[in-house]
Image (spheres, helix red, strand yellow):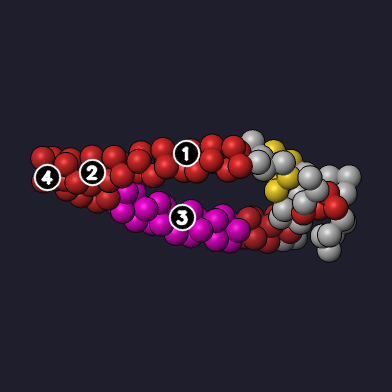
Amino acid sequence: MMNGCEDGSCENSCNEKQGCAQDQCGYEQSTCGHHHGWSQEDMAGKMMHLAKEAKMELIKEKMKKRLEAVEGKKLDKLADLVVDTMLAKYKLKGELMKKHDELGEKWEDMESQMHEIFSEK
């Protein structure tokens, strides 16, 4: 059975499967976007995989809700502490960069004055 690029029906001819690679689920996909070799069993397997992923996402959401109910206040305090520390660090880093720039200007002035002193006759 020929489909997609195998029968040459794509705009970008890839009958030789040039540029095809395995995607994360193991199905070949060409650069033109067609999938090669997908049988009904492959599709069913992919759907089962998606269902398992959805279930894990749902479990994760439920765990988040449960943790929020039980530990929410503690986690809020922790988040505040971390964010406040991060912001203080960024502020200090900005001040340090400003001081660094000021020192660089003073250094250039000093070098200029030294050059003038040693250039005098």
Foreground label between 1 and 3: 1
Question: Decide: marks 3, 4 in contact (CB < 8 A)?
Answer: no
Q: Which label sits in the foreground, 4 or 1?
A: 1
Q: Residue at x 36, y 39 (%)?
A: 56
State the residue position of label 3.
97
The amino acid pointed to by label 3 is Met
Element carrying mark 1: helix
Residues 47 and 82: in front is 47
The residue to which callout 2 is attached is 62
The residue indicated by pointer 1 is: 48
Q: Would you name the residue on which mark 4 appears?
A: 69
Which residues are the magenta region?
86-110
Question: Does 84 sit left or right of 96 as displayed?
Answer: left
In this view, 111 is above or below 78: below
C-alpha separation, residue under disc 3 versus residue under disc 2: 44 Å
Three-letter code, disc 1: Met
Q: Quadrant of residue 32?
A: bottom right
